[in-house]
Image: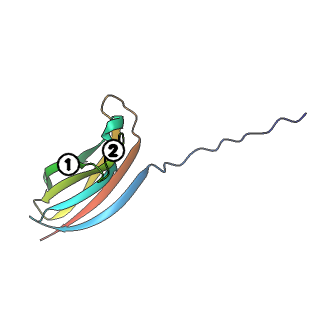
Amino acid sequence: MLCPLLILLPATNCRSQVDEKFVKVNKEFKIPLDSNPSTGYKWEASFDKAFLKLKADRFKRPAKALIGAGGTQTFVFLPIKKGETQIRFVYKRHWEKTVAREKTYTIRIHP
């Protein structure tokens, strides 16, 4: 009897994504991300405070109220000076070190 052969290949990091945004100084912009805090997961943002100010971090449930359903976590930023910077988001439980997802935005700030 032959046993099946299982070959494991190294996985690529498909949890990470990079996007680009063009914004203007002193004009707020939003970044909405799918989120489900009922599972303990939440997006956390890391960014350079010399370029951006976080104005809000809000969660909105879906229109249809289902137990355990996800929603949208929206970050509102205010660009405070011209230049280029990045915002790195990680989706994780605050008590765990493991990151479930990552997303990075390159922000190009124009006058």
x, y percentage for residue 98?
40, 34
Relative to 37, say whether 16 is above or below.
Answer: below
Q: Is residue 40 visible?
A: yes
Question: What residue is at 41 percent from the left and 41 percent from the top?
Answer: 100
Question: What residue is at 30 percent from the left and 48 percent from the top?
Answer: 89
**Among the 4 quarters of the image, the one containing residue 40:** top left
Secondary structure beneath disc 2? strand
Query: Please, which residue is most extreme toward the right here?
Result: 1
- Toward the viewer: 5 or 111? 5
Residue hosting label 1: 58
Relative to 103, say whether 1 is above or below.
Answer: above
Q: Which residue type does callout 2 highlight? A: Val
Please tell me how crowded label 1 is: few (under 14), some (14-19), or many (20+) other residues with Cα within 10 Å. Answer: few
x, y percentage for residue 15?
45, 48
x, y percentage for residue 57?
19, 48
Dot label at residue 90: 2
Question: What residue is at 71 percent from the left and 42 percent from the top?
Answer: 7
Q: Is residue 19 left or right of residue 2?
A: left
Q: Is residue 41 left or right of residue 57?
A: right
Secondary structure beneath disc 1? strand
x, y percentage for residue 96?
36, 30
Task: State how many labels appear.
Answer: 2
